[in-house]
Image (cartoon, rainbow, N blue to C red):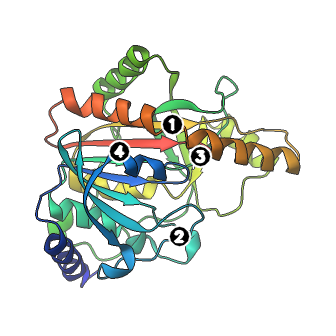
């Protein structure tokens, strides 16, 4: 981590050479939500391969480019595709873009991914506002040497999700007339889907949805972007007693539904940050497998 500051500075400087604005919002688009990039009035589109020190996005459906521009008049830096440890990257590489976007000036972060619903009250395509998470990855992007200029050694995660913003997100969902729940996200390393016994275990310990890698970005953003955050995600039902073909069918159905959800996600995220002071605020949006 001793050279991490240099990598951040070099990546940020390259992006600034291609786009003169300072983003107010950072957006990371995961599986199924790449279409959200069309909501951005693009002023610069930069392939990850061109940005110094950025990993390459190899996951299916992740385009691998940074779309910079305006969204409803707000300057945004949008990652069309994200990185995962199962692609062979360590967690410092996975979370580097969060550090770079903070260097560029973001005050708010929206993150999306595909996750699996375990709560029997959830349906495919529902939205969940995350109120807490459980880390079962056995890893953390903050391990190793700590550069105090990048954040504290021991960030407090006991209040990672601001109740005021959660309530506001749920209110927006009601006004926009789409289903939104609140719940607990469980983060695993992947890349395999869980066994039926694992689904039952994760439900017993308090999980409502389960996904891969996503919460490591929260760990990093939490100590850089600030304290307040509202986390939303689109989800669908994981089948606790399903056979292989059912799992495959559900996974495809989720991806199909996710493609129809960028409008909901945009309304939810924009509605929250439009009416909430963004100083020290983070917003994370999640789509569920």
The residues tagged by marks 1 and 2 sit, at their Cα atoms, a distance apart of 26 Å
**Left/right of residue 88 with respect to residue 275 in the rendered view:** right
Disc sitting over residue 85 in the figure: 2
**Which residue is painted at 21% across and 71% down in the image?**
15
Q: Earlier in the sequence, mark 2 or mark 3?
A: 2
Q: Residues within 10 Å of mark 1 (few under 14, many from 20)?
A: some
Name the secondary structure under disc 2.
helix
Q: Is residue 15 visible?
A: yes
Residue toward you, 29 or 215: 29
Q: Earlier in the sequence, mark 4 or mark 2?
A: 4
The residues tagged by marks 3 and 1 sit, at their Cα atoms, a distance apart of 14 Å
The residues tagged by marks 2 and 3 sit, at their Cα atoms, a distance apart of 16 Å
Name the secondary structure under disc 3.
strand
The residues tagged by marks 3 and 4 sit, at their Cα atoms, a distance apart of 23 Å
Q: Position of residue 234 (x, y in %)?
A: 53, 37
Q: Earlier in the sequence, mark 1 or mark 2?
A: 2
The residues tagged by marks 4 and 2 sit, at their Cα atoms, a distance apart of 28 Å
**Which residue is painted at 79% across and 50% down in the image?**
248
Q: Quadrant of residue 203?
A: top right
Disc sitting over residue 29 in the figure: none
The answer to whether marks 1 and 4 mark residues whose Cβ atoms lie closer than 8 Å is: no
**Left/right of residue 195 with respect to residue 24 in the rendered view:** right
Q: Earlier in the sequence, mark 1 or mark 4?
A: 4
- Which image quarter is the N terminus in? bottom left
Q: Which residue is mark 4?
A: 39
Q: Which residue is mark 1?
A: 261
Q: Which residue is mark 3?
A: 115
């Amino acid at each position: 981590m001793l050279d991490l500051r240099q990598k951040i500075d070099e990546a940020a400087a390259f992006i600034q050479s291609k786009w003169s604005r300072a983003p107010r919002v950072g957006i990371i688009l995961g599986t199924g939500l790449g279409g959200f990039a069309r909501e951005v009035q693009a002023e610069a589109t930069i392939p990850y391969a061109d940005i110094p020190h950025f990993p390459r996005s190899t996951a299916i459906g992740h385009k691998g480019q940074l779309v910079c521009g305006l969204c409803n008049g707000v300057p945004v830096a949008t990652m069309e595709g994200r990185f995962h440890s199962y692609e062979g990257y360590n967690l410092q590489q996975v979370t580097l873009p969060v550090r770079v976007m903070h260097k560029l000036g973001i005050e708010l972060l929206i993150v999306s991914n595909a996750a699996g619903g375990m709560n029997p009250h959830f349906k495919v395509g529902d939205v969940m506002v995350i109120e807490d998470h459980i880390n079962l990855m056995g890893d953390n992007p903050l391990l190793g040497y700590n550069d105090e200029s990048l954040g504290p050694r021991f960030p407090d995660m006991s209040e990672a999700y601001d109740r005021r913003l959660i309530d506001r997100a749920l209110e927006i969902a009601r006004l926009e007339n789409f289903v939104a729940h609140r719940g607990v996200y469980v983060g695993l390393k992947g890349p395999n889907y869980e066994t039926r016994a694992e689904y039952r275990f994760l439900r017993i310990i308090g999980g409502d949805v389960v996904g891969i890698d996503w919460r490591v970005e929260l760990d990093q953003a939490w100590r850089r972007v600030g304290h307040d955050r509202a986390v939303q995600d689109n989800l669908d039902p994981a089948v606790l007693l399903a056979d292989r073909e059912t799992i495959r069918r559900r996974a495809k159905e989720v991806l199909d539904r996710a493609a129809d959800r960028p409008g909901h996600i945009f309304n939810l995220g924009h509605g929250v940050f439009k009416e909430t002071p963004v100083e020290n605020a983070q917003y994370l949006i999640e789509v569920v497998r």
